[in-house]
Amino acid sequence: MSKDAEECQPVAEVKAPIKTPETAISTPRELAEAIDEKPEPIKEEIDVKPQKDPNKQYIDDEGCPVINLDEPQWDGSTFSGRMKNYMAPRRLRYFFASSQTLKDAKELIRKYLCGEPLEDVTVNELWEAKHKFDSTFHPDTGEEISLPTRKSAVVPVDGLITGLMMTFYRSIPGIIIGQWAKQTYTSGFDFANRTCDKQEIKIPQYKAAYAMGTGSAIMTAIGLGSLIKKCHPPVLGRLVPFAGVAAATLIYNPFLNARVLNDGWQIYDQENNLLGCSPTAAAWALPAETIGKVAMVMPPMVIPPFIMHHLEYKKKLFCRYPWAQAPIQIGLCCLCIMFLTPMVRALFPDRSPMPFTQLEDEFQEDIKEACTPPDTVYMKNRIN
C-alpha cells in the first residue's frame, strides 16, 4: 500500500476504559465511601417566619411594652373578670411572701415600664409581679404599705377582727372594743390604699369621718342589742354587729367623700377618656358606692351567724366545747371574705353608664365646645 493510502485510512476510535465491578472500586476506602454515599434530597425553599412564644408577647418587635399594666388583667365588663381582678392582689400567699420577693416584683415592674429588656419572663410572670405590687405597694407613690393594711392582709386581719367582734357581741365591752377595732381597720385600710382621686382629702377629714363612723357603730350596736336581747329567735342578736358596721358605713363614706358633691365625679367616654367632673354624676355615684360597701360586709357578718346559731342550739356543740366558738367564728369569716366577698364585689360594674343629657347644662356646653358629645358617659366605681 502506498504511503498516501496509509495516510487516508481512518483513525480507530479511542474509547475510555469501562470500569467493571472488579475495577470500579479498587480500595476498601472507596468501597466504604460508595456505601455511605446517598443521593441528596431535593430541598424546597419555604419561607418560614419565626413564631413568637405566645406566652412571651409582652413586647413588640421593637422591644416596646404592649401590655397595659394600668388596666386590669381580666375583662372588667364580665362577672368573672371583675371577681378575678378583685381577688388577684388579695391572694393569701402574698401576705406570707418574703420582703425580697416583693421587692423583686416591684423591680420587674419598674424595668418593664421603663422599657428595659426582660429575659425569660413570661406574660403570666409579669402579671404575677403586678399583682404582688398591687398587694403590697401604694398604687401611685410606690411606697410599701404597712403589713396590716395591705390588700393581701384583708383575709387574715379583717377575718380575725370580724370574727372576734361577732364572738363577743353579748357584752357591752365586747361591743365597744369590737366596733372600735373594725372601724379603725377600715379607716386605716382606706387611708393607706387611697388613690390619686382621693389625695385631696385631708387628714382632719379622715379623723372626723373615723370618729363619726366609730361613734355611730357603737351606739347602734349597743342600742339595738338592748332592744332585741330578749327577742326570739336568738339569731337576731348575732346580727347586731352587722347593723353597727352598716350604720357606720352609711355615715363614714358619704362624710369622707362629701367634697365630690361640689367638685364633681369624674366622667369618661366609651374609650375611657376623661371628660371632666360632674356634681350631678356624684349625686348618683356616691350613694351607689356606699350601698356597695355595705353589701360587701354582708357575707362575713350575715352568713356565719346562722351557722353558729345552728351549731349552738341544734347541735349543742358549744355546750360541750365552749372554747371552739371563737376559732370556728373566725374561720367562717375568713372563708366568706376569701370567696364570697369577691362575688358580691363582682355584682357591681366597674363603670356605670349615664345619659349625657342628664348632666348639668354647663358641663354639657363645655363638652360640646371641646368635642362631639357622646350619647352615654361613664362613671368609675371606686368600691375596694
Image (spheres, rainbow, N blue to C red):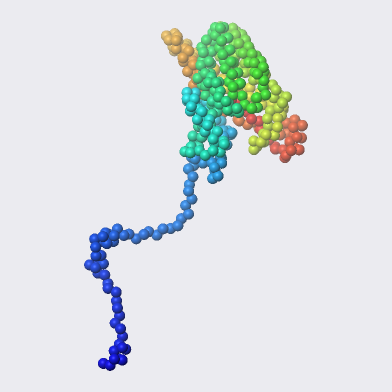
Q: Is residue 300 visible?
A: no
**Residue 21: x %, y % from top left:** 24, 67
Left of 366 or right of it: where is 322? Answer: left
**Which residue is found at the position 70% from the left and 22% from the top?**
259
Where, by quadrant of the figure, is residue 218 drawn? Answer: top right
Q: Is residue 370 visible?
A: yes
Considering depth in this image, is 344 or 152 the residue closer to the camera?
A: 152
**Which residue is found at the position 61% from the left and 30% from the top?**
350
Eyeballing the image, is 58 above or below 146? Answer: below
**Residue 101: x %, y % from top left:** 48, 28
Q: Quadrant of the C terminus?
A: top right
Considering depth in this image, is 54 or 102 the residue closer to the camera?
A: 102
Where, by quadrant of the figure, is residue 113 drawn? Answer: top right
Considering depth in this image, is 128 or 114 the residue closer to the camera?
A: 114
Considering depth in this image, is 32 or 245 the residue closer to the camera?
A: 32
Q: Quadrant of the N terminus?
A: bottom left
Residue located farthest toward the bottom when viewing the structure as drawn: 2
Q: How many marks?
A: 0
**Which residue is found at the position 67% from the left and 17% from the top?**
204
Residue located farthest toward the front when viewing the structure as drawn: 3
Eyeballing the image, is 354 above or below 179? Answer: below
**Residue 32: x %, y % from top left:** 26, 59
**Which residue is found at the position 60% from the left and 28% from the top?**
140
**Residue 133: x %, y % from top left:** 54, 29
